[in-house]
Amino acid sequence: MEELKQLLKKLVEANGPSGHEETVRNIIKEELTNYVDEIKVDNLGNLICTKKGAKDTPKAMILAHTDEIGMLVRYIEKEGFIRFSYLGGFFDQMVLGQRVLIHTEKGDIKGVIGSVPPHLLPEEERKKPINRDKMFIDIGATSREQAEEWGVKIGNPITWLGQLEELGSNMVTGKAFDDRAGCAVMVQALKEVNAQCTVIGVASVMEEVGLRGAQTSSFTINPDLAIAIDVSATGDHPGVEERQIPVKIGKGPGITIADGRRESLGGGLISHPKVLKLLTETAQKNNIPYQLEIFEGGTTDATAAATSRGGVPSATISIPTRYIHSPIEVLSLEDLSNAVKLLKLSLENAHKYF
C-alpha cells in the first residue's frame, strides 16, 4: 500500500487542469514504460498504453482522466489583481480564501483568492454568498505591468496549491483526487495485470469540460468493453442523509449502476449488464468489498465510451471520496488498494465474459 500511496502523492502534487495535462501524462508514461508493450500520445493529448493479450481475445479499455478542475487567467486589473475563469465545475463557496498556483512560462506564481472583507460590506451583503465575479487573485503585484513582467498573461492555467497529507484511519487528503486517484489505480493495475485479453489504459484529457479525451480515444480504439476509474461522492458525513447516497469511505470501491443528472439521470451512463456482472462476480469470488451506487449529479468517461461508434459495453469503478471538486478531498487508501485488486482481477477474467 505504501507504493500506491507514493504513486498517488506524485500524481496529486502534479498540476494539470483541463487542456494542460502534460505534467501528469509524463508521470504516467514514465511509470508504465517498462510494463506495457506500446505507449503513444494521440492528437488531443490522450496517453494510450497497450498491454497485448492473446490472439482473438477481447480488447478491454481502461479510462482514467488526467485533468483536474482548474482556472484560467481572464483579465489583469491595472493594480495587478487577477480575474479568472473556471475550467470545470466549482462551488464558489469552496474557492474564496484558497491558495493557488498560476503556471507561467517563467515559472509558477503563488497567489491567494480574495474579495472585499466582510467588515466593509453592508449588513445584508454579509449574509449572501460571494460569487466568482466578486473574487480576484492577489499575487503581490502592484501593477498590471509588474504582473506581466513576472510572466502572467491571459490564458495562464491556475490550480490549487496543496500537498497530499495523511489523516487518521488510513485516510489521506489533497487536491485532484478527481481523478488522480483513478490514474493511480489504472497505473498500478496495468503494472500487475496478467490478462489473456489486450488491455489498453487511456490517461484521458479534458474530462472535466465534457469527456473530450474519452470520446476521441474510444472512437480510435473501438474496444470490446470499457471501464472508467473515477471518484464518487459519499454520504458518510454531516449534512447528507444515507438515503441520498449510501456510499461510505472505507467500505470498498463503488460499482456504478447508473449516473447522470439529478432530476433524470440523463446525460450519464446506464452501465452495461455484462460489465456489471464481470465486476460484481469478480469482487464476490475474491472477497473484495464493494458498494453498488447510483450517482445523481455527474458522470464519467464511461459515458463517452458507451456511445462511441456502434456502442461499447461500459461501466465505472469509483473510489469513495469526500468533498470532491475541492482542494481538501478525502479518501481511504484501503478503498484505493481494493479498487486496484478489483480492476486487475476483472481484467484477468474479462475473456470469460466477452
Image (cartoon, rainbow, N blue to C red):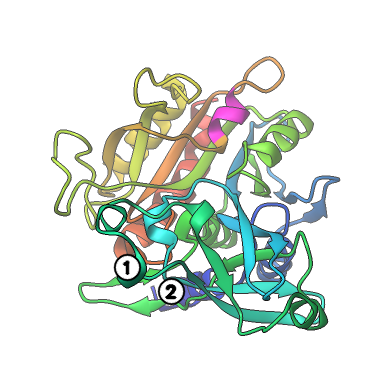
* N-term mark: 2 or 1: 2
User: At label 2, which amino acid type do we have?
Assistant: Lys
Where is 54 relative to 101, above or below?
above
Amino acid type, label 1: Pro
Residue depicted at 77% across the width and 83% down the height: 146
On the picture, is 229 further left or further right than 24?
left
Q: Which residue is mark 2?
A: 5
**Residue 173 picture quarter:** bottom left
Q: Badge 2 local density, few (<14 within 10 Å), some, or many (20+)?
A: some
Task: Calculate the distance from the C-alpha at mark 2 to the C-alpha at mark 1.
Answer: 40 Å
Question: Eyeballing the image, is 299 above or below 149?
Answer: above
User: Residue 126: where, in percent of width, then height?
Assistant: 28, 58
The residue carrying mark 1 is: 118
The answer to whether marks 2 and 1 mark residues whose Cβ atoms lie closer than 8 Å is no
Q: Quadrant of residue 271?
A: top left
Q: Nearer the viewer, residue 102 or 31?
A: 102
Q: Is residue 233 visible?
A: yes
Q: Secondary structure at mark 2?
A: helix
Report x, y in % for residue 181: 47, 59
Q: Nearer the viewer, mark 2 or mark 1?
A: 1
Quarter of the image that includes the C terminus = top right
Label 1 environment density (alpha carbons within 10 Å; few <14, some 14–19, many ≥20): few
In-image side of 214 versus 236 (left or right)? right
